[in-house]
Image (cartoon, coloured by chain):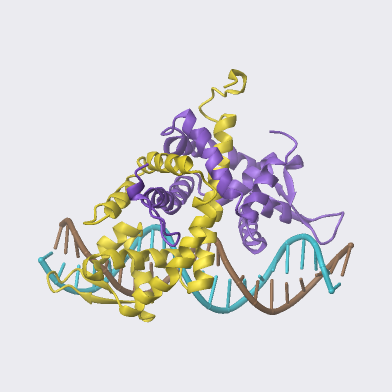
Chain colours: A purple, B yellow, C brown, D cyan
Amino acid sequence: VDPGTVDPDPRWLGEDERRAWLRLVMLLEVLPGVLDGQLRRDAGMTHFEYTVLAMLSEAPDRTLRMTALAARSNATLPRLSHVVARLVDRGLVEKRPSTQDGRVTDVELTGEGHAALVQAAPGHVENVRAHVLDPLTPEQVAQLEEIAEAMVATIPAAQRMLEAWEDRPER
Amino acid sequence: VDPGTVDPDPRWLGEDERRAWLRLVMLLEVLPGVLDGQLRRDAGMTHFEYTVLAMLSEAPDRTLRMTALAARSNATLPRLSHVVARLVDRGLVEKRPSTQDGRVTDVELTGEGHAALVQAAPGHVENVRAHVLDPLTPEQVAQLEEIAEAMVATIPAAQRMLEAWEDRPER
DNA sequence: CAAGATTGAATCCTCAATCTTA
DNA sequence: TAAGATTGAGGATTCAATCTTG
């Protein structure tokens, strides 16, 4: 816009870039806490745990192997292993070795797990609306999709996660 | 756009909303790891530690009290206290009780700390460019600023953090 | 008693090493 | 030997409790 404010030095950020970046960093710092906080208070679960349950609820037979679940939730296998162990302790999922391949572990959402998810969903959606969707115009929602997509495309792990999400029979 | 795809039920997300939200979640899951990873590998520090050092470097006398530092970095006081203790151990900052008010602790960036920051900055900026700024058009950078600002405005803690950042003598 | 800050326990994530089966 | 998954140690964050000074 005003050429005088443009910083040509690629080693630092221009004013417009700095303002956008600052606000994005703020979001990265604060939003996870907002999501986690609401779910923890109202449903006794982490946002990550919610994601795991949600993935299973949409899978055929409400069952996914560890590797597939890890891909859809952007978790490392060790992290997922720990989290699933806790969910088993709470009775929200069940774990058993596959009959097809002795190396793979199948994880299935239990009735209790499904109930917990159904109970948690409305409050979570309301929270997302309040802090993310409602303050945006429909045009901005569309812009956000394209902007986030462009960034995700530069990160192979995120790209794979997105494909795992959308490469489903439905939706 | 197509009225047939609009979901009128406020308890769930419409298709456009879902797509935007999914991509934002992906970013929230992945970007912190990308930022942390680069800084950890190349400079041996966390993104949060980098932020703390950066705040101090821009403060008068390169000094800030704990509360002010916490406000600018979106940290709880306990978290900041732990992190600053580690930075003291590494010689990157110094800590001393204020002469004005015995309750407050002043934190000052050391020469070593400034050197570490200067050394870390170029790689960090390059990383931010690669994954955030470069994949966006200038228009999208401007849109991102407004979108993130709208979300931040719904979160009082983030709002205060932003004000603390921009209520500085310069910039 | 309020404000500024620290401490410690509990929890969760990361990373490397390990184990089991194909 | 590679693929799938688990384990355990170390680090970082959170929360509640505590301490000190105004």
Q: Nearer the viewer, residue B145 or B30?
A: B145
- The single residue placed furthest to the front in the displayed view is A3
Q: Position of residue B157 (x, y in %)?
A: 33, 49
> Residue shown at 35%/41% (left/top)?
B153
Q: Is residue A87 left or right of residue A99?
A: left
Number of numbered markers: 0
Residue A17 showing in the rendered view? yes
Q: Nearer the viewer, residue B114 or D3?
A: B114
Q: Position of residue B80 (x, y in %)?
A: 35, 66
- For the C terminus of chain B, which image quadrant? bottom left
Q: Is residue B136 above or below residue D11?
A: above
- The single residue placed furthest to the top in the displayed view is B3
Residue A110 showing in the rendered view? no
Q: Position of residue A156 (x, y in %)?
A: 65, 55
Q: Position of residue A119 (x, y in %)?
A: 55, 38
Q: Is residue C10 left or right of residue B18?
A: left
- For the N terminus of chain B, which image quadrant? top right
Q: Is residue A20 above or below residue B94?
A: above
